[in-house]
């Protein structure tokens, strides 16, 4: 389990306990902040408040018994204790003590100006102090002596679980993904398969997760969040997994195959399709969706799908009316995707025309069936980003990424062969938009020449079997 997964497990261990309110789990920066205020406030409230309350109760009983002098002797200290407890709570509320920080990216404890590397900590530095009502866990290092968490005595199981999981985090060696340690050869191969997409977006290729260091790590996690949301539309784990599954099962390979079939048709038929596509796209852009728009759209669909065009064309009216079950068939689902892009992506028509132009090259057209890496390489990177933002555990990512790497290795003969197919996939996908193709070609050249690139650190025919604990 990676750092983010262990932090999640640590938080789950204290959910609903007294300690939970004193702990701030910052997954964005990989920091656990310990605020002793709730524990102190609870202790003083229960201690002073309980004593004060008992004194007031005794005073009331004495007053009812007619012992006014004795009642006053009980009321005065009782009121004083209650007032003292409230004063302490207010003081802690508005002038809290500084927080203790456990910073997992930097592997150190911070308190005020003191810094203690995790490497200096020992199990005996985590010490319990047991009281009548509470169990308190302290960090008792010579440089820092502070309370870490407090539990009610009834929360003994949660307290023990918290201590165990906290020590797992403090004593863990610098993990390969989250904390910057070396990847195993197979893990490095997997990261290398996604190297072009990772490198072009500024991510390191020597780990699964974010860069080491607070600022660099936070920047990587922020960028991962932004890229998941745009262009991938993934705002949560479910959407991320849906995007990754789509890339693996269909991806843009299906579009490339269909456009390749279009590009192989006679020139007159291609010109007819291109003219209809420009016409329909212009009507959508101008919001001219009245007749003859539907008729022209049906004709576009009929020409697009060739020999199967009549069957697809019959589905257009029901899809436009959003009738239930209209996209239930394979044809309906495929056509719904095409119409969705045509209506919602203003660049789709121009990009498809660009693909048809590029696919006029018979060599590229013959290679369309080998462009799986364009989809698989991005799916691998989605898993990396999911780990960086804390949605996926390290173990989950490697388990899902290894089978994809095996498929990639079977499909291509070398890193260079894989990279060439990635570039061809990018060329067809981009439609000439975004970064120039030349920039990607230069990136691939740098990856091929860099001695620290995964492509030069592990051989292509490496036996891709799990080689990590």
Image (spheres, grey):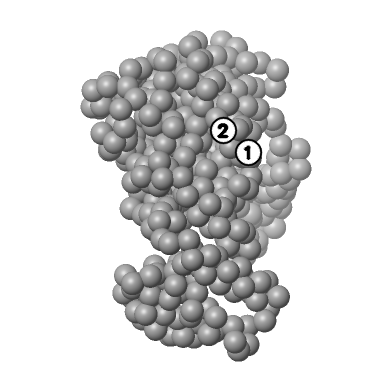
User: Toward the viewer: 455 or 146?
Assistant: 455
Image quarter hosting the C terminus: top left
Q: Can residue 346 be seen in this view?
A: yes
Q: Using the rendered image of the protein, determine whether residue 137 is visible from the camera's viewpoint.
A: no
Query: Mark number for residue 440?
Result: 2
State whether residue 205 is above or below residue 284. above
Q: Which residue is drawn at 42% across and 36% down?
A: 421
- Identify residue for label 1: 436
Residue ID at (67%, 81%)? 288
Task: For label 2, count other residues whose C-alpha is less than 10 Å away and answer few (under 14), some (14-19) or many (20+).
Answer: some
> Given contact means CB atoms under 8 Å apart, are the residues at marks 2 and 1 in contact?
yes
Residue 164 is situated, as x and y percent measured from the top left of the image, at 37, 29
Q: In which quarter of the image is residue 400?
A: top left
**SS class of the residue under badge 1?**
loop
Marker disc for residue 16:
none
Q: Is residue 289 left or right of residue 466?
A: right
């Amino acid at each position: 389990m990676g750092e983010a997964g262990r932090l999640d497990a640590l938080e789950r261990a204290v959910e609903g306990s007294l300690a939970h309110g004193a702990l701030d789990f910052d997954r964005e920066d990989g920091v656990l902040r310990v605020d002793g205020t709730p524990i102190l406030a609870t202790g003083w409230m229960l201690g002073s408040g309980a004593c004060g309350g008992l004194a007031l109760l005794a005073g009331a009983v004495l007053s009812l018994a007619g012992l006014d002098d004795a009642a006053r002797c009980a009321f005065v200290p009782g009121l004083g204790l209650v007032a003292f407890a409230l004063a302490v709570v207010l003081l802690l509320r508005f002038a809290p003590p500084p927080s203790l920080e456990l910073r997992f990216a930097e592997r150190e404890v911070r308190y005020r100006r003191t810094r203690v590397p995790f490497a200096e900590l020992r199990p005996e530095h985590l010490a319990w102090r047991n009281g009548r009502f509470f169990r308190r866990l302290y960090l008792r290092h010579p440089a820092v002596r502070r309370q870490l968490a407090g539990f009610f005595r009834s929360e003994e199981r949660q307290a023990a679980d918290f201590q165990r999981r906290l020590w797992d985090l403090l004593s863990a060696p610098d993990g390969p993904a989250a904390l910057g340690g070396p990847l195993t050869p197979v893990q490095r191969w997997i990261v290398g398969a996604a190297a072009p997409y990772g490198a072009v977006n500024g991510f390191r290729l020597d780990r699964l997760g974010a860069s080491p260091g607070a600022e660099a790590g936070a920047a990587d996690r922020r960028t991962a969040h932004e890229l998941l949301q745009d262009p991938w539309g993934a705002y949560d784990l479910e959407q991320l997994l849906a995007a990754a599954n789509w890339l693996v099962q269909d991806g843009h390979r299906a579009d490339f195959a269909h456009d390749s079939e279009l590009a192989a048709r006679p020139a007159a038929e291609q010109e007819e399709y291109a003219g209809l596509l420009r016409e329909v796209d212009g009507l959508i852009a101008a919001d001219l969706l009245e007749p003859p728009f539907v008729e022209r759209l049906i004709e576009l669909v009929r020409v697009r799908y060739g020999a199967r065009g009549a069957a697809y064309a019959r589905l257009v009216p029901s899809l436009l009316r959003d009738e239930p079950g209209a996209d239930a068939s394979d044809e309906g689902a495929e056509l719904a995707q095409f119409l969705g892009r045509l209506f919602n992506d203003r660049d789709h028509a121009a990009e498809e025309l660009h693909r048809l132009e590029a696919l006029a090259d018979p060599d590229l057209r013959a290679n369309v069936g080998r462009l799986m890496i364009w989809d698989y390489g991005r799916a691998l990177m989605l898993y990396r980003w999911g780990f960086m933002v804390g949605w996926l555990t390290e173990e989950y990512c490697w388990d899902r990424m290894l089978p994809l790497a095996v498929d990639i290795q079977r499909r291509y003969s070398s890193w260079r062969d894989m990279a060439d197919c990635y570039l061809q996939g990018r060329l067809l996908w981009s439609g000439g938009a975004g970064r120039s193709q030349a920039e990607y070609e230069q990136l691939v050249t740098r990856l091929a020449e860099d001695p620290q690139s995964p492509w030069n650190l592990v051989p292509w025919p490496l036996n891709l079997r799990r080689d990590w604990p």
